[in-house]
Amino acid sequence: MSTETQTEDVGQRGIVERLRASPFLSELLSNRLAVAGLTIIFAMVAIALYSRLFVDLGSVTQSQIGTNPNLAPPSWLSKKTAITGEYGTFAYPFGTDIQSRDIFSRVLYGTWLAMKYGTITVGASTLLGVGLGILAAYYGDITDNVIMRTMDVLLAFPSLLLALALVAIFGTGLWKVVIALTLVYTPRFARVVRGAALKVLEDEYIEATEALGAKDPRVIVRHILPNCLAPITVQSTLNFGLAIIDLAALSFLGFGAEAGTPSWGLMLSNGVKNGLLTGDWWWSFFPGLFLAITVLGFNLLGDGMRDALDPRMRETVD
Amino acid sequence: MISKRFVIKRLLLLVPVLFGVATFVFAILHLAPGDPARVIAGQRASEEFVRQVRTELGLNDPIWVQYGRFLLEAVQLEFGNSYQIQKGTPVKQILRYKLPVTLEMALYGQFLGILFGIPVGLLGAIKQDAISDHVTRIGALAGISVPIYWSGPLLILLFAQVLGWFPASGRIASTFDINPITGVITFDTLVRGNFAAFESAAMHLFLPAAVIGIYSMALISRMMRSSMLEVIRQDYMRTARAKGQGSKITILKHGFRNALIPVVTVIGIQFGTLLGGAVLTETVFGIAGIGTLLVSAIQVGDYPVVQGTVLMFAGLFTLVNLLVDVTYSYLDPRIEQ
Amino acid sequence: MRSGDSTDSDYSPRGEEASGGDRTRDDSPTPRERARQLGRALLLGAMLAAIAVPILVASGESVRFASEKVFAVGALVFGFSLLGWSGSVFAGRGMENFQRHIGGRSDWSEADSRRAMTVLGSVGVGGMLGASLATMVVGSVV
C-alpha cells in the first residue's frame, strides 16, 4: 500500500485516504473481536439482502395452515417430519409457528426488516444530531447551552421509557416507533458531533479560513464534517445494536410491527406468550438468536472502533 | 456526616420533580391521539353519551382550566379512577398493590447485579489482559447485547422447562393464598410465618431477578473494571507501590473505595434503565407489576393509570438517586456537603 | 452544600480545555441580563404559540383542537425543563464528580444546566400563555 503517494497530495485527501493513512484502520483490523463483529455484520447484511430478494413475502406473512405442518419442531431434530416422513431433513430447519409459517424464512426476512428500520432510525438520528451538534458548536453561548443541556436531560431518561412516552404521543406502528427512537437517539449524536466540531473550531486554521472570508456552510462542510466522521461512525455502530434491541422491544410490547409482520420482536412476543410454556421453544428461540448475534456484532465492532480511536475521542464517544 | 438538612433539601426537590412529571404527563395525554371520553364510554356508545362523559370529565373547559385542575389533583396525588383497566377503581389503590411487585423484583435483581458485578469487574482490573479478563469482558458485552426478552425466555427454557428447578411465571404457586400486607411477597409470607409460601415466592422470583441481575451485572462490572484501572494508573497508587506497601493489597485497600464512586453513580443512573427493563421482564415472566400496567394503560388509553404509573416511576428514580447521593458522601468525604 | 446553595454567580468555568476557548461562558451574566434573556425566551414561546394557533385553525382544525395541542406542546417543554432543572440540582454534584473521575473532558456543569433549563422553561410557559391568549382572540373572531 503506497501511503507515500497519497500523503503527497494533502489538499485532495479524501475520507478513505484519511482513514487508510491513520493508524485507526490497521489497529481496528488487528483487533480480533472487532474483526469478528465486522464479519457478523457482513453476514447479516448478506442475509438481509438475500431475503429481501428471494424470500416470498406472502409466505412469511400470511397463514400457511394446510400447506405446512403446524408448530413442527426444527426438522433436523424431529425423528420424522410430518409431511415427507423422512428422517432428519432440513425442510423446516427452525420449525414452524402456530400459523404453520416456516420460521427459518421468517427469521431471514426479519433480518431485512431489522437492518432496514435500524438503518433508517440510526441514519435519521445521525442527521438530526449532526445538525444540532454543529448548531450548538458554531453559535456557542446560550444556543449551545440550551441545546446541549436539553440533550443531557433527554439522555438521562431511560431510553425505553422515553420511547414509550413518545409512542403514546405519536400512536403505535412501526414508522411511529422509528420516529420515537430517532428522537431518543439524537442526543447521543448531537453530543459527539458538538465535541468534535468544537475541537475543529478551536484549531487555528478555521480562524484563518474565517479571516479569509469563507462563509459558514463552507467551513462546516470542508472542515467540521470530515473531522466528525470518525466519532459519528463509532456512535452509529454502537447505536445500531441498541436500535435493533429497542425496535424489537417495542414490537415485543405490542407498539410496533402489526400482526403478521415477520419482525423479530413480534415473533419473540408471540413465541414467548403462546409457545414457551407449551414447549414450542423454537418459535421464540431462533428470532432471539439472530437478534442477539446481530447486536453482538455491532457492539463488538463499535467497541473495537472506540478502542482504535485516539484516547481523546474515546471519552467523547460513549 | 450526612446532615438532616441535606436530606430534607433533597426531598424537597421531589416537589418540582413531581410537578414537572405531572405537567409532562398532562402534555402527553393532550397530545396523544384519541378521545378519553370515547375510551370511557366504550366504542359502541352513542355520540350523545360520549358528549355527556366529556362534560363530566371537564374536557369541554378551556385547556388552561383543565391544566390548573389537573395540577391541583396531582399535587394531592389524586389521579382519579381508572378508565378501563380496572374501571372505576382509584388509580392510587391499583398502584398500591402493583408497585411493591415491581419494586421487589427490581431490588432483588439489582442486588444480584451488585453482588456479582463488583467482584467480576475488580478481578478484570487486577488481572488485566489475563484470560479471565477477556472472558469477563466478552461476557459483559454479551450481557448487554442479549435483550431481556430473549435471555428471559432462555432461562425459562433451561431452568423451568428442561431442568424444572424454578417455576416459569407468576409470583407464587396458586395453592397459596396470601393476604397482602405490604405487597412485597417474600416479606409478607415471612411475616405470616408461612415458610412453604415463602419458598414458593422466592423460587418464583429467582428467574426474573436473575435476568435483571445479569444485565446490571454486565454494566456494573464494565464500569468497575475501567474505574479501577483508572485508579490504579493514578500517581498515588504508584507511589504507594514504590514505597513497597505490597501491591495487590494496596490496590484493594486504597483504590477500591475511590473506584467505587463512579460505579455508585452508574448504579443510580442505571436504576432508571432497570425500571424500563421491568416493563419487559414483567411481560416475559407474566408478573403483574407497574411495568405491564403501564404498557396496557398506554395501549387502551387509560390516562389516569398512565399518569399515576409515570409519576411513580419518577418518584422511585428520584429516591434511588437520593440514596446514591448519600452513599456518595460516605464514600468520598472530601466532597463537602 | 455545593449544589443546593450555589448561586449562579459563584459559577466559575473549569479552565483547561473545557468547552473551547473563547466560547466558554466566561463571565456569568448579571441578573438583569438574565432577566432579559428569560423575557426574550418567554416572548419567543408566546409568539410561536400565537402563530401556531391561527395557522392550525386556518388549516381547518377546530379552535378547541388547536388550543389544546399548542398549549400541550408548551406544557411539554415546560414540564421537561422542570424535570431537567430539578434533575440538574439533584444529580448535579454526582455528575460533576463522576466526570472529573472519568477524565473531565465533558463540560457539564450544574449551574449551566439549570440556566439552560430556566430559559427552556420560559419558552414553554410563554407557549402556554401565548396559546391561551391566541385562543381567546381567535375564539372571539371565529
Image (cartoon, rainbow, N blue to C red):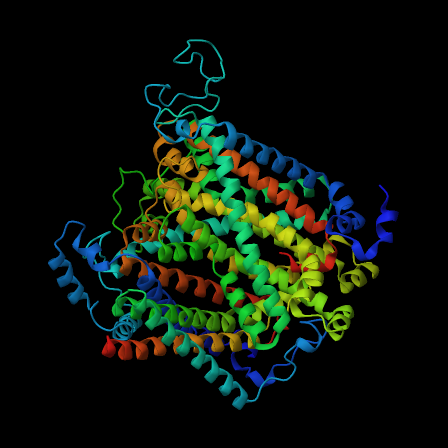
Q: Which of A23 and A62 is in front in this view?
A: A62
- The residue at the point 77 percent across, 72 percent down is A208
**Residue depicted at 49% across the width and 77% down the height:** C119
- Spot occupied by residue B256 in the image (x, y as percentages of width and height): 66, 58
On the image, the x and y values in percent for residue C136 come to: 27, 79
Instruction: Pick whichever, C122 or C102, lies toward us.
Output: C122
Q: Nearer the viewer, residue A174 or C78?
A: A174
Q: Residue furthest bottom?
A: C32
- Residue A271, quarter of picture: top left
Q: Based on the displayed image, in which of its 4 quarters is residue A300 positioned?
A: top right
Q: Is residue A137 left or right of residue B106?
A: right
Query: Is residue A52 shown above or below B199?
Result: above
Left or right for B227, reference A248: right
Q: Visible in this render: residue B336?
A: yes
Residue at image coords 44%, 37%: A263
The reply, left or right, for residue A248 in relation to residue A126 is left
In the picture, the quarter occupied by the N terminus of chain A is top right
* Residue under the image location 68 percent in, 70 percent down: A215
| Residue B113 visible to an observer of this rendering | no
Query: Where does residue A294 sit, x and y in percent of width and height?
Result: 56, 38
**Is residue C41 positioned above or below B175 on the image?**
below
Q: Quadrant of the C terminus of chain A?
A: bottom right
**Figure check: B178 above or below B154:** below
